[in-house]
Amino acid sequence: MSRVRALLARETALAWGKGGGPMVAVGFYAGVATLLPLAVGSEPERLAAIAPGAAWVALALAALLSLDRLFERDYEDGSLDLLTLSPVPLEIICAVKCLAQWLATGLPLALAAPVAAIALGASPQLSGLVIACALLGGLAFSFMGGIGAALSLGARRGGLLTAVIVLPLFVPPVIFGGGALASLDSGLPWKAGFALLGAYTAAAVALGPLAMAAACRNALS
Amino acid sequence: MIPEVSIQSLALSRGGRQLFSRLILKLGAGEAVALTGRNGAGKTSLLRAIAGLIAPDEGVIAFGGVEPAEAREAMHLLGHLDGLKSSRTARDELSFWTGFAGGAADAPEAAAARLDLLPLLDLEVRRLSAGQRRRLALARLLAAPRPLWLLDEPLSPLDSEWRGRFGQIMGEHLSSGGMILAAVHDPLPLAARTVEIGR
């Protein structure tokens, strides 16, 4: 247990530290949210209609940004070799890395999400659900994204490959979360979409580490 | 604790090319073996296969009745990829890896003192020279005692003084019942059996 705690502390410090981390992800998120009105036109009615969905898609893209180095650095510098020589199963190690990733980028992004949504013209009473969706969805993005990051280990231009593998896996949470937000916005029942998002996240957290560990073992051998 | 390593008719291949076959090797407590052979002969691959990272084509790697999964907790692997993060301080990295390998909380300090690293502990790993960085990686072996040391070119960045001092450290490890398997080009600074790979 103390090993897992030490690993989580180290991984979070690394993900938070130089060359990445929360500021870069939030900056990218702000950039995408700013580009959008420039591209689709700045009429408030049109923007307000797409604001929750746009904030949500930008979130998925920002989550993608920090994925490509999730396993790559540890693979290149030998950490992954050494991490396997411990009683901690590789599945747990992968889960801890994704959790640290979420703590360092998913959490700050979730806090930034309602700001971006409101700036784009979404109604402020959506904020609570925007944060809740971003927190849950971010966890799914980290764990599903980890599969892509692990599968592209050792490939040249792995970052690009990661994006291609991962984006289809991001489709369900984007649909469920966006659906819940749109429903609440137009006064329809939103709980079903939110529950499906939660279910997808639970599946990602439970099954993602198995796939990641298998992909890492394959890359190491 | 693993009592011995015994390798029976091992064959390994990488990238579709067979490196060696029918390799037989036995390593008991207190023994050191120097693996030699030309570049690409498969020395590193053999060490990684013993660490369970590569599956052999055929043959058996046994650890005297200990399950391979359990045996991995009784070995250190040290190669040119040392797992040290250049943006973190030497102290953070040494204490993380010591804890992760199951060493005591005060062990990193003692190991660092033994390898003359105390004045360097607060530096980021990127500020260390290649030799200092290798000494930091070696400190891990002392801080978390494990019987089997798998060393890949352990001496290469070290100067002649440190080669000698590391020889002493290896000698102490052997006399306390440890085992050393080292891939080397230069002879080890202590008496060791030599096994040539890939012939």
Image (cartoon, rainbow, N blue to C red):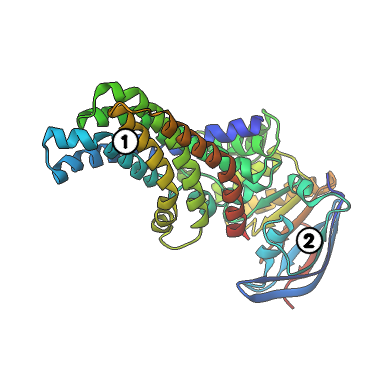
- B35 left or right of A115 in image: right
Q: Which residue is depicted at the point 40% across and 35% down? A: A105
Q: Which quadrant of the figure has residue B192?
A: bottom right
- B105 left or right of A186 in image: right
Whole-number angstrom distance, CA of label 1 to CA of label 2: 53 Å
Instruction: Kindly identify which chain the residue marked by label 2 belongs to.
Output: B
Q: Which structural element holds mark 2?
A: strand
| Residue A131 drawn at (x, y percent) | 37, 27
The residue labelled by disc 2 is B33
Q: Which residue is depicted at the point 68% across and 61% down? A: B54
Q: Is residue A184 above or below residue A20?
A: above
| Residue A99 drawn at (x, y percent) | 51, 36
Q: Which quadrant of the figure has residue B40?
A: bottom right
The answer to whether dots 1 and 2 both sit on one chain is no
Q: Which residue is depicted at the point 37% across and 33% down? A: A180
Q: Callout 2, which amino acid?
A: Val
| Residue A210 drawn at (x, y percent) | 61, 47
Q: Which quadrant of the figure has residue B44?
A: bottom right
| Residue A22 drawn at (x, y percent) | 37, 34
Q: Could you classify mark 2 by the number of other residues whose Cα lies within 10 Å: few (under 14), some (14-19), or many (20 or more)?
A: many
Q: Toward the viewer: B175 or A73?
A: A73
Q: Quadrant of the C terminus of chain A?
A: bottom right
Q: Which structural element holds mark 1?
A: helix
Q: Callout 1, which amino acid?
A: Val
Instruction: Determine which of the numbered discs, if any, sits on residue B22 in the image.
Output: none
The residue labelled by disc 1 is A26
Q: Could you classify mark 1 by the number of other residues whose Cα lies within 10 Å: few (under 14), some (14-19), or many (20 or more)?
A: many
Q: Is residue B57 above or below residue A129?
A: below
Q: Toward the viewer: B165 or A137?
A: A137
- B2 left or right of A137 in image: right
Instruction: Kindly identify which chain the residue marked by label 1 belongs to.
Output: A
Circle nearer the viewer, 1 or 2: 1
